Amino acid sequence: MVRNIADVPQLDGEAVDTQQLKMAQSLVDSMSTSLDKIELKDNYRQALKEMVEAKVEGREIVTVAEEVAPVVDIMTALKDSIEQAKADRKPMKKTTGKARAANEKGQEDQDQS
């Protein structure tokens, strides 16, 4: 569920873009599912148990630092993607009416045969 816009910090009373709100709601709806449909497994408990056992046995415990992923502004990325798609699209050719005239002439020739 999307929280009330008044509860979102750092907006300072800015107006909400209804298109962005609809897109966000659609994204949340498409990605949400019931917890019953997800297979959940507690890996933390098993990993902690293994670390404690290793420490008791005198083995060295090795940990890995988490990588900090860069934050991406999704609206900017979406706009860039749309602009790229527009740039890649070939412009439509103007019609001169020659093809239609040729089709009509061909149709007249068939009617006369």
Image (cartoon, rainbow, N blue to C red):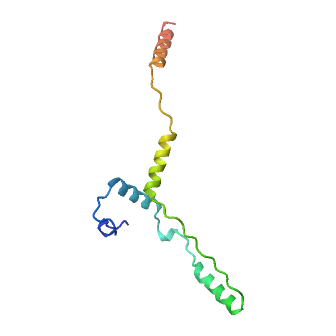
Pick the quarter of the image with the N terminus.
Answer: bottom left
Q: Nearer the viewer, residue 19 or 11?
A: 11
| Residue pictured at 63% horizontal, 82% vertical | 47
Relative to 92, say whether 53 is above or below.
below
Residue at the far bottom in the pictured view? 56
Where's residue 30, x and y in %? 45, 59
Where does residue 39 sit, x and y in percent of width and height?
Answer: 56, 71
Residue drawn 55% across and 70% down? 68
Instruction: Write down the quadrant of residue 17 in the picture.
Output: bottom left
Question: Residue 18 location, x and y as percent?
Answer: 32, 55
Looking at the picture, how far across and down is residue 74, in whole percent? 45, 58
Residue at (37, 55) in percent of width and height: 20
Q: Report the label total.
A: 0
Left or right position of 65 against 35: right
Above or below for 56 versus 47: below
Task: Name which residue lies at 44% across and 19% down.
Answer: 97
Left or right of 64 in this view: 82: left
